[in-house]
Amino acid sequence: MIGWSRDLPVPADLPFRRSGQSPIAGALQVSFDDLQAWHANHLRVVPGTLNIQHDVSSWIKAEMPFEDLRPLIKRICDWGGKQKRFVLPRVKKESDDILRKSFDSAQSFLVLGKPREALAAICCIQGFGYSFGSKHLRFLSPKICPVLDSVISKRLSYKPSIQGYVPFSEDCLKIAAKLSPLDNASWGAADIEMAIFSYLYHPWKPL
């Protein structure tokens, strides 16, 4: 299993290491340029990401009208991968009241900078475990919310649970804070996770 070193260096190299080993022994180095390339690769492979992000941001600014919620959930679940075939039928059966309250509560917690509580709130919806719950948080607040799914939980040392989500979010934020000045851009936790997911999931180096 590959783990993530929590001792993040000044950002020319961002180490991933095998569990139980020192950050140096068996380290797999990912450079800043590589992170940029893998981030771009993710956007190329999943071209609808920024469109959904824009539309969810507009929805929040419009005070989250409920009539748009189920279509947005459908789009995010479609974006989220093959497991949607299990998630969407259960979400369709969920009551309007629980959907509304769960998203309102999650958004309130995100405004306070509390992703753990936001994930717990959104996971009250039928079919939403930590993975699809975090996929929705990723669009509600990409600045502080990455996606924690099976690819990352299996390959990195984060528990596949709500409890494992907080340290992953915190580590993504630490890296984003170090990379943003170098890139003269605003990296968020979701951007870091996108790059890492692409790096772990695709066995080739992007052009």
Image (cartoon, rainbow, N blue to C red):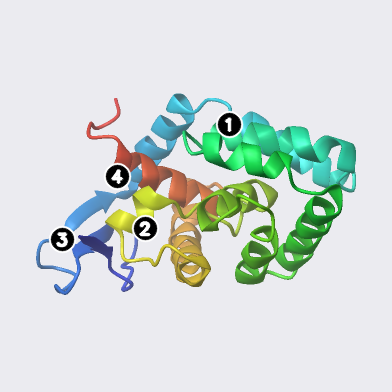
Q: Are marks 1 and 3 in contact (CB under 8 Å)?
A: no
Q: Are marks 2 and 1 in contact (CB under 8 Å)?
A: no
- In this figure, which residue is indicated by the disc labeled 3? 27
Q: Are marks 3 and 4 in contact (CB under 8 Å)?
A: no
- In this figure, which residue is indicated by the disc labeled 4? 200
Three-letter code, disc 2: Ser
Mark 1 surroundings within 10 Å by alpha-carbon count, few (fewer than 14), some (14 through 19), many (20 or more)? some
Locate residue 26: give its quadrant.
bottom left
Q: Are marks 1 and 4 in contact (CB under 8 Å)?
A: no
> What residue lies at 20% left-to-right and 63% top-to-bottom?
17
**Horizontal side of residue 110 vs 15, given as left or right:** right
Which is more foreground, mark 3 or mark 4? 4
- In this figure, which residue is indicated by the disc labeled 1? 78
Q: Which mark is residue 153?
A: 2
Mark 2 surroundings within 10 Å by alpha-carbon count, few (fewer than 14), some (14 through 19), many (20 or more)? some
Quarter the N terminus occupies: bottom left
Mark 4 surroundings within 10 Å by alpha-carbon count, few (fewer than 14), some (14 through 19), many (20 or more)? some
Which is more foreground, mark 1 or mark 4? 1
